[in-house]
């Protein structure tokens, strides 16, 4: 998995790392059991502080997407298509509500929000299909 940081992004670096891993899982680039690079390796690769990577990994763990094992090994926690829990749903719904509210606050109407959501879901599905070829 390749993580590219955008200097001009309004998102903090840890969030960009988090989002890259989430997207890789959602598109099938990372699958259940796949090992992630260590915190130290990611920090060295991106020339950033390890605490920044750790913050991203901690958030991913809290969301149930990755798990740490003995000796610092970190893997994708579970197949996202078969393990949704009430806690996962609550976190997901809260994040979705935040994004919907942000869209509204920025002046987007319901149709524009739904159109964008459909486009992004279509893109994710196309990436998922491409990763299974």
Image (cartoon, helix red, strand yellow):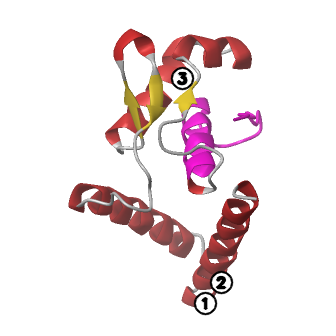
Residue bearing mark 2: 115
Against 63, is 101 above or below?
below
On the image, the x and y values in percent for residue 54 come to: 47, 21
Q: Quadrant of the C terminus?
A: bottom right
Secondary structure beneath label 1: helix
Instruction: Report, in whole angstroms, how far the alpha carbon at label 3 lies from the one at label 1.
Output: 36 Å
Please report the residue visible at 44 percent of the width from the left and 56 percent of the height from the top.
Answer: 80
Estimate how packed mark 2 is, as few (under 14), some (14 to 19) or many (20 or more) residues with alpha carbons within 10 Å: few
Please report the residue visible at 60 percent of the width from the left and 90 percent of the height from the top.
Answer: 111
Marks 2 and 1 in Cβ contact (< 8 Å): yes
Instruction: Report, in whole angstroms, how far the alpha carbon at label 2 lies from the one at label 1.
Output: 6 Å
Marks 2 and 3 in Cβ contact (< 8 Å): no
Residue bearing mark 3: 53
Q: Residue furthest bottom?
A: 111
Q: Magenta region: which residues?
A: 1-25
Q: Which mark is residue 111?
A: 1
Secondary structure beneath label 2: helix
Estimate how packed mark 1 is, as few (under 14), some (14 to 19) or many (20 or more) residues with alpha carbons within 10 Å: few
| Residue 4 lies in the magenta stretch | yes
Question: Residue 25 vs residue 127: left or right?
Answer: left
């Amino acid at each position: 998995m390749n993580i590219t940081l955008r200097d001009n992004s309004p998102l903090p670096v840890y969030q960009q790392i988090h989002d890259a891993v989430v997207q890789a899982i959602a598109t099938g680039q990372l699958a259940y059991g796949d090992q992630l690079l260590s915190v130290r390796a990611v920090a060295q690769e991106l020339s950033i502080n390890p605490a920044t990577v750790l913050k991203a990994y901690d958030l991913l763990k809290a969301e149930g997407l990755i798990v740490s094992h003995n000796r610092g090994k970190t893997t994708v926690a579970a197949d996202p298509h078969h393990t949704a829990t009430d806690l996962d749903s609550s976190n997901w719904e809260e994040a979705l509500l935040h994004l919907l509210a942000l869209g509204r606050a920025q002046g987007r109407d319901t149709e524009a929000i739904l159109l964008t959501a459909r486009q992004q879901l279509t893109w994710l599905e196309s990436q998922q299909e491409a990763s299974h070829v």
